């Protein structure tokens, strides 16, 4: 079982007198920077000129180039897109990452798969919130926290763990749960979760359900509400009270259907495929494919992304969400979505 930490178990003093450079001001970056600042931590933001730079400035941060921010900081939290990190690390971070500083990540991908190789004389840790960045900020403002994993990859100072825990507390995770893990476990479980369950599994399930209904002659609007919109209401119940709590709220007819049909949809074959997906993650095969896809300028990523936009589910969904202004989109230009 995992070692758990909560606010009462954690001292924030390891961050006293330290400056944290939040590198990148996107989904995670804006949330870390603002939560840390609200927790009394000295924060500078490092980013390239453009939209994020402007946003960080509007939010009242001292903004500079990545190199300058790293030079000023004791703790450098890298919140750039994973596929950009190796290049920015080489050019702008490593030259200013002097002995005794700490290098931190919100995902272990690059360190675990050797795309970023930190020098020996710095601390290396991760604090990975288990939720989309916009929720990391929103839940914190509401007085709660999104749980996080933390791990120490390299302890040069002898206090890497204390700094990682202090960071977890300052970002608000100690209000929910802070779990100790390794870079390997965080990386592999995070990739597996997003592929098999949270993102890949869910989008494929929603699409298959929608297509089945529409192909059988039912109206796309009805299929959209049934298979996508209502999922949020069900997920909220799961989040609040688990499978049992969700089943308490649905009708007994729905619960009987859940028991009898669920294992037919997600069956032994599905689980066998999940095991393959996991072993491709563990072997580095997935990481290699993604690194090469990026080096090739993402031919498949772009082609599939374009195809997906034209799926009938998306076409009808855009129209329906436009009529429901109470649904707020976190991503400009996309109605009703939050990046994660
Ligand atoms: P985003 O894509 O939302 O944000 C990336 C940020 O990096 C933007 O501010 C972008 O600025 C900036 N950036 C991109 N390229 C450069 C560059 N060359 N130089 C300087 N700044 C640059 O990233 P995420 O927040 O999604 O991901 C950050 C990390 O957090 C990743 O390691 C990810 O795995 C991890 N993570 C993400 C989660 C999430 O909720 N999204 C959940 C848990 C972990 P610009 O506007 O100029 O492009
Ligand atoms: Mg994740
Ligand atoms: Mg991830």
Image (cartoon, rainbow, N blue to C red):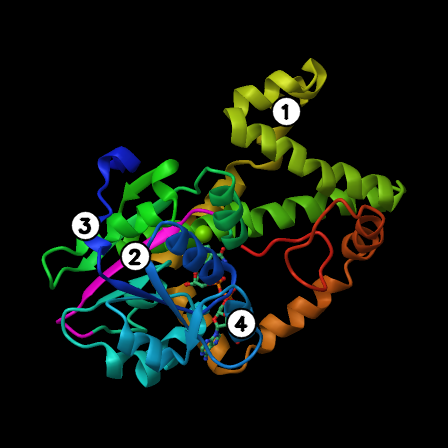
Q: Is the residue marked by circle 3 packed among few (<14), some (14-19), or many (20+) residues within 10 Å?
A: some
Q: Quadrant of residue 47?
A: bottom left
**Residue drawn at (71%, 16%), measured in percent from left and top?**
253
Percent across and percent down for residue 186 are: 33, 51
Mark linked to residue 162: 3
Mark linked to residue 52: 4
Marks 2 and 1 in Cβ contact (< 8 Å): no
Numbered disc 3: secondary structure:
helix
C-alpha distance separating marks 2 and 3: 12 Å
Mark linked to residue 126: 2
Q: How many marks?
A: 4
Numbered disc 2: secondary structure:
strand
Q: Does 239 appear above or below 299?
A: above
C-alpha distance separating marks 4 and 3: 30 Å
Q: Does 304 appear above or below 330?
A: below
Mark linked to residue 258: 1
In primary-sequence order, the first of circles 2 and 1 is 2
Pair 3/1: label in front: 3
Pair 2/4: label in front: 4
In primary-sequence order, the first of circles 1 and 4 is 4
Pair 2/3: label in front: 3
For the question of whether residue 83 can be seen, the reply is yes
C-alpha distance separating marks 2 and 4: 23 Å
Which span of residues is magenta-colored?
Answer: 119-131
In primary-sequence order, the first of circles 2 and 4 is 4
Numbered disc 1: secondary structure:
helix
C-alpha distance separating marks 3 and 1: 45 Å
Q: Quadrant of the N terminus?
A: top left
Percent across and percent down for residue 201 are: 57, 47
Q: Is the residue marked by circle 4 packed among few (<14), some (14-19), or many (20+) residues within 10 Å?
A: some
């Amino acid at each position: 079982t995992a070692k758990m930490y909560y606010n009462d178990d954690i001292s924030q003093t390891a961050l006293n007198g330290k400056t944290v450079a939040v590198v990148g001001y996107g989904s995670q970056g804006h949330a870390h920077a603002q939560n840390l600042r609200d927790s009394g931590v000295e924060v500078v933001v490092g980013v390239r000129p453009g939209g994020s730079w402007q946003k960080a400035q509007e939010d009242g941060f001292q903004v500079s180039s990545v190199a300058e921010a790293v030079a000023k900081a004791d703790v450098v939290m890298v919140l750039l897109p994973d596929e950009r990190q190796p290049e920015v690390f080489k050019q702008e971070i490593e030259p200013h990452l002097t002995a005794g500083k700490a290098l931190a990540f919100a995902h272990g991908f690059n360190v675990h798969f050797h795309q970023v190789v930190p020098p020996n004389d710095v601390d290396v840790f991760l604090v990975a919130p288990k939720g989309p960045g916009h929720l990391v900020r929103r839940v914190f403002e509401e007085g709660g926290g999104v749980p996080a994993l933390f791990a120490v990859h390299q302890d040069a100072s002898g206090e890497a763990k204390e700094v990682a825990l202090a960071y977890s507390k300052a970002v608000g995770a100690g209000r929910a749960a802070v779990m100790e893990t390794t870079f390997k476990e965080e990386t592999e479980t995070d990739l597996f979760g997003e592929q098999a369950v949270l993102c890949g599994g869910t989008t494929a399930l929603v699409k298959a359900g929608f297509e089945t209904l529409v192909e059988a002659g039912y109206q796309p609007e009805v299929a959209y509400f049934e298979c996508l919109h209502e999922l949020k209401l069900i997920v909220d119940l799961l989040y609040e009270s688990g499978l049992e709590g969700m089943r308490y709220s649905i009708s007994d007819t729905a619960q009987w259907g859940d028991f009898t049909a669920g294992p037919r949809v997600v069956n032994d074959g599905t689980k066998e495929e999940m095991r393959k997906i996991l072993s491709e993650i563990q072997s580095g095969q997935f990481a290699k494919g993604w690194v090469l896809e990026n080096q090739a300028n993402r031919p498949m990523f772009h082609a599939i992304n374009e195809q997906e936009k034209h799926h009938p589910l998306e076409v009808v969904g855009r129209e329906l969400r436009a009529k429901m202004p109470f649904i707020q989109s976190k991503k400009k230009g996309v109605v009703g979505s939050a990046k994660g």
